[in-house]
Amino acid sequence: MTIFNLTLPLLILSLFFILLQRFRHGTRNLTEFSSHGPPTYPLLGCLISFYQNRHNLLDWYTQLLAQSGTQTIVVSRLGARRTIITANPDNVEYMLKTNFHNFPKGKPFTEMLGDLLGHGIFNVDGELWHTQRKLASHEFTTNSLREFVVKTLESEVNDRLLPILASACHSGEVVDLQELLKRFAFDTICKVSLGTDPGCLEPSLPESGLASAFDVASELSARRATSPLFAIWKAKRVLGIGSERRLKEAIRVVQLSVMEMIKRKKVRNEEEANESKGSDLLSRLISCVHDEKVIRDMVISFIMAGRDTTSSALTWLFWLLSCHPHIKKEVVKEMVEISKGKERLEYGDLKEMNVLKACLCESMRLYPPVAWDSKHAAGGDTLPDGTHIGKGDRVTYFPYGMGRMERLWGKDCEEFKPDRWLESEEIVSPFKFPVFQGGPRICLGKEMAFIQMKYVVASILRRFELRPVRKDRPVFVPLLTAYMAGGFKVRVQERKMAPLCLVP
């Protein structure tokens, strides 16, 4: 049976449920849809305009939000759940903190990513989330884990990343910095999470079946969310065809690979029972959690979070710095002044690099690694701006759009100006800048991510000058984690500074 043959009955079924919804909610929502969102029609909702803008959703939503008096829009389309999209910090705080318990991930979200993330911490609610959060919070605050991360970071940067860039510098070869950073992040997070080295950043740049499977699985899982009719991907999953068949195969590779690593780690830990507990996260989880599937799902979640977010943030920062050489000079100047006369870069030195941190924050304001995030209302509610929320509604906060709201950041909101993070003594609210979320679900690895990104940037800029090959503006692609379409191709030139070492 072809997708075309499936479409008509699915449309009829969807129409029935939309009609039922309209009957239950009356005409009030129709008025609301037409005045606080895209052009909307009976039955179809905004399906037509959504389809027309499906390849440009980020800028389309941003424009609609900027035109809204409350920085909130309501989107209703055939075959999808009623969705409220907001760039209003008061609404974000209400969702993520004030009334946190009424805005869980929700079944529609966990179903969409459940095949890949299972019951991992980023895809569960309630007691299961609370238990994993408590365990992860304890592990992320231990000095031994921090020291292990620092050691891993130094080894991966100085023994692999920098030599590859040096080789490209001497040969004149063009390298894809985004790809190198993804490989670097994958090696690092696998060492920290699994205690295993995939070696993706070896000089030969070997292909990793696990890394490739992660790429396919994350992309296809994300594309479920942008499907005009959710019933289509669900039908394809049931039939095991098309993108859903490829997704199932990729997830199988990921799960089997991680499960095999768990079993090997258990055997190794049993053989070394008289020695101290391993420093990697997997060894710690094995000693605390007895269900292998829960361990597997937690590890997959940590790899997803630690791999793609940092590489995305770094890629866009290096591109922005290449467009603003005067800002890059300030970063290099700060780095040299702080590390001057030292053979090794100390952990405390990185904490003092405020100009570099401002650049990272400003880069993520404009190009957040996660462009949007959604919750689903457990019960009826009203947001601080007066927007009505029905039970089961999807409520999305939108970091990409928030970074481009003039009412939040001023008339220069679309400009790369790191000084905005240094000139004000006020700490920017996590609900105005929700790149790391906020409230009970705030990112546990936030500080670790900043240390990692600072060390990578400082190490590269201390030795090399990166010259982008392309002159046009790159395209920002938002999937589970955003990336730069076509990669970030650069030529590498020597800056003639000594390499840095990191001391915890």
Image (cartoon, rainbow, N blue to C red):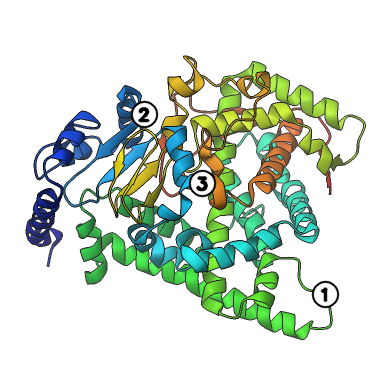
With respect to residue 216, does 254 lie above or below?
Answer: below
Rendering coords of residue 152 (x, y %): 74, 55
Rendering coords of residue 429 (x, y %): 57, 33
**Circle 2: residue type:** Gln
With respect to residue 440, does 117 lie above or below?
Answer: below
| Residue under the image location 20 percent in, 59 percent down | 231
Depth order, front residue of 29/61: 29
Residue at mark 3 to residue at mark 2: CA–CA distance: 19 Å
Depth order, front residue of 442/466: 442
User: Under tag 1, what secondary structure?
Assistant: loop
- Quadrant occupied by the N terminus: bottom left
The answer to whether the residue labelled 3 contacts the one labelled 1, judged by CB atoms less than 8 Å apart, is no
Q: Is residue 139 left or right of 374 when viewed as pictured?
A: right
Which residue is identified by label 1? Answer: 276
**Circle 3: residue type:** Lys
Numbered tag placed on residue 97 in the rendering: 3
Residue at mark 3 to residue at mark 1: CA–CA distance: 39 Å
